[in-house]
Each structure stands twice: as C-alpha cells, then as structure tokens.
Image (tube, grey):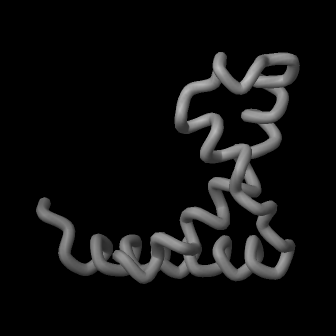
Amino acid sequence: MLALAPARNRLHVMEMKPAFEEATRGRGEDELYKIAKTMLALPDTSMKDYIDAEQAAERLRDGYADYFSRYDAD
C-alpha cells in the first residue's frame, strides 16, 4: 500500500488543486487552513504522471475485484 501513496498523491493534486484554487481565490494567506496551503503549494502533476497514477489505481481496483470474486464471504 505504501508504494501506491505517491500514485494517490499525483491523482489528488491533479483532481483537487483546481477546486482548492477556486475555493480560496481572493483569500489571504492567513485565512487558509494548513491543508489548503499545502495543496496549493504542491507542484502540478504532469499528464504522464497522472496517467501512470490512474493506471496504478485501476490495477489496484482490479486486484481487489479479483480477490473478492474468489474469496467473498457468503
């Protein structure tokens, strides 16, 4: 799971940063919570990194689906 953390971060930045920018537009630095400051300070995710992260997340979903299709507790 730790190996997937960077992939999740790349997804979150690409998907959430625009919403943070919109929600905080016009606000002063002293009005922002730490999470907003952190998100806005992160570098943008490149399209290649985003696609790699999306594919890694899809492999994880497929792995869970496969596991539970074989070992589901009925």
* x then y, percent, for residue 66: 38, 79
Q: Quadrant of the C terminus?
A: bottom left
* x then y, percent, for residue 73: 13, 63
Which residue lies most toward the front here? 30
Q: Quadrant of the N terminus?
A: bottom left
Quarter residue 44 falls in? bottom right
Using the image, determine if residue 68 lies above or below residue 26: below
Instruction: Determine the residue positioned at 71% across, 50% down.
Output: 41
* x then y, percent, for residue 50: 75, 71
Q: Nearer the viewer, residue 30 or 13?
A: 30
Q: Nearer the viewer, residue 45 or 52?
A: 45
Quarter residue 51 falls in? bottom right
Q: In the picture provided, is 31 more to the left or to the right than 46?
A: left
Using the image, determine if residue 25 lies above or below residue 14: above
* x then y, percent, for residue 12: 63, 54
Using the image, determine if residue 39 lies above or below residue 58: above
Q: Nearer the viewer, residue 3 or 61?
A: 3
Instruction: Determine the residue positioned at 85% across, 73% down.
Output: 47
Q: In the picture provided, is 45 more to the left or to the right than 68?
A: right
Using the image, determine if residue 56 lies above or below residue 45: below
Q: In the picture provided, is 28 more to the left or to the right than 7?
A: right
Which residue lies most toward the left here? 73
Instruction: Determine the residue positioned at 65% across, 46% down.
Output: 39
Q: In the picture provided, is 58 more to the left or to the right than 63?
A: right
Total number of numbered discs in the rendering? 0
